[in-house]
Image: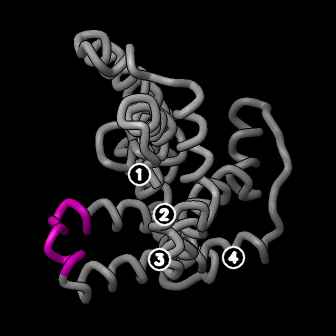
């Protein structure tokens, strides 16, 4: 089982991930070309202004009004992206498979980033369960996506701490990572890839058409 999840399954996950991204890009470009207002109203100026405002913590009014959500959201996304890329074990696997190497974070830093992701996931879950205005717009798929995003970090933490059977936890960790990678292009997790484009369009519509801010 380990040989499969550390070999063929990794390749399958990457093929689905890259293929899914290319498919979504082609699909979105075709949709944009058929729409008479999307591409003509795209503005580099207002798109960049909007993008900068929404990637800088507390730059927008909405972020300042919900400071706790802003802090947790930025910490969650930052750790979610950085940890898989710069984790020593992952870099070693990439180096073994493709010969590529890059800088890694220390084990203590990796542990801290993992804990941040897990605590942030608990925060988002509690928020969806306890706040009526959030629970009202929450569907079963939202809980599933949160579980998919958190599972690689929870299982990685459990394997690192050697909770339960180590080999089993490593296998589950690899499977959950592959599932998350394959889910990104075809679920709302794709916002981590297409956020710049959607934000640029929103900024262009508000700034160039409505002559108003979108933050």
Residue 152's mark? 2
Sequence-wise, which precedes: disc 1 or disc 2?
Answer: 2
Residue at image point 85% right, 50% down: 103
The quarter of the displayed image where residue 160 is located: bottom right
Query: Distance from label 4 to label 2 (Cα)?
Result: 13 Å
Query: Distance from label 4 to label 3 (Cα)?
Result: 31 Å
At label 4, counting other C-alpha atoms closer than 10 Å, the crowd grade (few under 14, some 14-19, many 20 or more) is some
Return the residue at label 4.
111
C-beta proximity under 8 Å, tags 4 and 2 = no
Which marked residue is nearer to the observer: mark 1 or mark 3?
3
Residue at image point 39% right, 42% down: 190
- On the image, the x and y values in percent for residue 178 come to 44, 48
Return the residue at label 1.
180
Image vertical order of residue 92 relative to residue 27, above or below: below
Q: Secondary structure at mark 1?
A: helix
Query: Distance from label 1 to label 4 (Cα)?
Result: 20 Å
Query: Which SS does the magenta portion mostly show?
Result: helix
- On the image, the x and y values in percent for residue 140 come to 16, 66
Query: Distance from label 2 to label 3 (Cα)?
Result: 31 Å
- On the image, the x and y values in percent for residue 132 come to 18, 84
* Left or right: 206, with 67 as reference point: left
């Amino acid at each position: 089982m380990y040989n499969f999840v550390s070999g063929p399954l990794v390749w399958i996950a990457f093929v689905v991930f890259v293929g899914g991204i290319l498919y979504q890009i082609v699909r979105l470009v075709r949709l944009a070309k058929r729409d008479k207002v999307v591409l003509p109203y795209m503005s580099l100026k207002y798109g960049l202004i909007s993008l900068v405002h929404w990637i800088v913590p507390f730059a927008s009014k909405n972020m300042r009004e919900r400071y706790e959500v802003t802090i947790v959201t930025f910490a969650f996304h930052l750790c979610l992206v950085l940890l898989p890329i710069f984790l020593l074990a992952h870099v070693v696997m990439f180096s073994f498979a493709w010969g590529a190497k890059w800088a890694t974070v220390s084990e203590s830093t990796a542990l801290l980033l993992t804990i941040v992701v897990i605590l942030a996931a608990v925060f988002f879950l509690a928020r969806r369960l306890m706040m009526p205005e959030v629970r009202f717009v929450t569907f079963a798929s939202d809980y599933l996506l949160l579980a998919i995003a958190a599972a690689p970090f929870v299982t990685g933490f459990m394997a690192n701490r050697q909770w339960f059977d180590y080999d089993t936890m490593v296998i589950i960790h690899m499977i959950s990572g592959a599932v998350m990678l394959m889910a990104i292009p075809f679920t709302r997790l794709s916002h981590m890839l297409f956020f710049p484009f959607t934000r640029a369009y929103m900024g262009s519509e508000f700034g160039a058409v409505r002559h108003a801010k979108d933050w």
